[in-house]
Image (tube, rainbow, N blue to C red):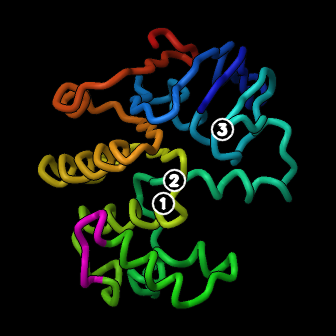
Amino acid sequence: MIRLYHVHKHYGDVEALHDVTVHVSKGEFAYITGPSGAGKSTLLKLLYGAEKPSGGKLLVGGVDASKLSNRQLPYLRRNIGIVFQDFKLIPNRTVHDNIGLALEVLGAKRSDIDRRVRASLNVVGLRGKGERFPLDLSGGEQQRVAVARALINDPAVLLADEPTGNLDGAMAIEVMEILLSVNLRGTTVLVATHDVALMERFPHRRLRFEGGRLVKS
């Protein structure tokens, strides 16, 4: 599903990723871990096309993401869901509108948007909260909305960048359990985190980075 071959990423004289080669299978759940500045977020940005590698080859679902033009990127991202630490919800739009925005941009029918938003809300345990606004919700609920938004296109790959970083222990566990349930449905899930307690509570493969190098896979 995801294959990197000798991937490098430079920002000027700084090498954020150095010679990374790794394979993540379809349907796998894996953590991307390591200290701050290790290259975790950089790797995720490469996977969803926010950045391009400085060298090497990067395949997502058989597509070489490093060679896609800006016009082609939306087609890649239709198969990728993204969850951020700071939620990135639009505060003056309802939960329903936040989740359905991607489909709205694609010109989907309102009836289809409504149906798929309800289904996504059910997956994350927020049935009936579609007409609420993000700031009316707890932090854990906001992150669940962000997960629902990432799932709206039924992506093959779900990327989560420190998804529990702003949550307390109980809420972090709830969000992790949702991500694991998504993985059980067949979605490949990559979670960038440095939360050792969560990784020990929910053990899965760890891809550990240090100084931009993959030191354990």
Q: Picture coordinates of residue 202 (x, y %)?
A: 22, 32
Going by the image, does 174 lie left or right of 29? left
Q: Which numbered circle lies on residue 43?
A: none
Q: Say few, some or many: other residues with alpha carbon within 10 Å of mark 2 (under 14 / 14 to 19 / 20 or more).
A: many
Q: Picture coordinates of residue 98 (x, y %)?
A: 47, 77
Which residue is labeled 3 in the image?
61
| Highlighted magenta segment, given as a residue range | 122-129
Q: Main secondary structure of the magenta part?
A: loop
Foreground: disc 2 or disc 3:
3
Residue plotted at (33% across, 43% down)? 184
Secondary element at tag 2: strand
Is label 1 in contact with label 2 (beta carbons under 8 Å)?
A: yes
Going by the image, does 44 lie left or right of 174? right
Q: Earlier in the sequence, mark 1 or mark 2?
A: 2
Q: Which numbered circle lies on residue 150?
A: 1
Foreground: disc 1 or disc 3:
3
Q: Which numbered circle lies on residue 82?
A: 2
213, above or below 132, in the image: above
Q: Earlier in the sequence, mark 2 or mark 3?
A: 3
Residue plotted at (61% across, 30% down)? 2
Q: Say few, some or many: other residues with alpha carbon within 10 Å of mark 1 (under 14 / 14 to 19 / 20 or more).
A: many
Between the residue at mark 1 and the residue at mark 3, the CA separation in whole angstroms equals 17 Å
